[in-house]
C-alpha cells in the first residue's frame, strides 16, 4: 500500500525532529495533502494509527488538510481553484491550464512535548 510507505518515511522525519528537539513525545502531526498527490486521506489515517504504536508518536493525533487544485489559465491568466477534475478555464473555456498547487504532500506541523 502506497500510504504505508508514506507513513514509514513520515515517521523517519518525525523521529529525527523529536530527537533534534529532545522531545519525549509527539502529540500532534499535521499534513497538507494535495488532491492530486495520489493519496487517500482515510488510508493515510489508518496507516498512521497502526504505525504509531510503540513509537514516540503513540499518542499523536494526525490531522490531514486537503489542498484543493489550484491552476492558472495559460490563455487568460485567470487563477482557478477546483474541487473536481474538470480542467477547463471558467472564464475563457481554455483547457491549457498550468497546475500551481494540489500535488504536494507536506508535513505542515509537528507538536512536540519536551
Ligand atoms: Zn482562461
Image: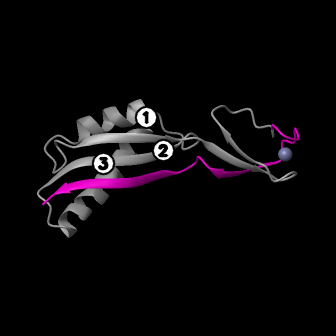
- SS state under label 3: strand
Q: Which numbered disc flags the more N-terminal residue, 1 or 2?
A: 2
Task: State the residue at coordinates (24%, 35%).
Answer: 50
Q: Can you identify the residue that label 1 sits on?
A: 41
Task: State the residue at coordinates (38%, 46%).
Answer: 5
Q: Is residue 72 magenta?
A: no
Query: Disc 3 versus disc 2: distance between alpha carbons?
Result: 13 Å
- Residue 41 placement (x, y as % from top left): 43, 34
* Residue 51 appears left or right of 91: left
Badges 1 and 2: C-beta atoms under 8 Å apart?
yes
Which quadrant does ligand 1 occupy? top right
Residue 1, placed above or below residue 13: above
**30 and 90: which one is in front?**
90
Q: Can you identify the residue that label 3 sits on?
A: 29
Q: Which quarter shows the N terminus?
A: top left
- Residue 21 placement (x, y as % from top left): 19, 67
- SS state under label 1: helix
Amino acid at each position: 500500500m502506497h500510504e504505508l510507505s508514506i507513513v514509514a518515511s513520515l515517521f523517519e522525519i518525525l523521529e529525527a525532529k523529536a530527537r533534534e528537539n529532545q522531545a519525549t513525545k509527539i502529540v500532534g502531526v499535521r499534513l497538507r495533502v494535495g488532491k492530486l498527490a495520489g493519496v487517500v486521506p482515510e488510508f493515510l489515517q489508518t496507516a498512521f494509527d497502526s504505525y504509531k504504536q510503540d513509537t514516540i508518536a503513540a499518542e499523536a493525533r494526525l490531522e490531514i488538510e486537503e489542498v484543493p487544485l489550484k491552476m492558472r489559465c495559460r490563455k487568460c491568466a485567470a487563477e482557478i481553484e477546483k474541487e473536481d477534475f474538470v480542467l477547463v478555464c471558467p472564464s475563457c473555456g481554455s483547457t491549457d491550464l498550468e497546475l500551481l498547487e494540489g500535488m504536494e504532500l507536506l508535513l505542515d506541523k509537528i507538536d512536540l512535548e519536551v
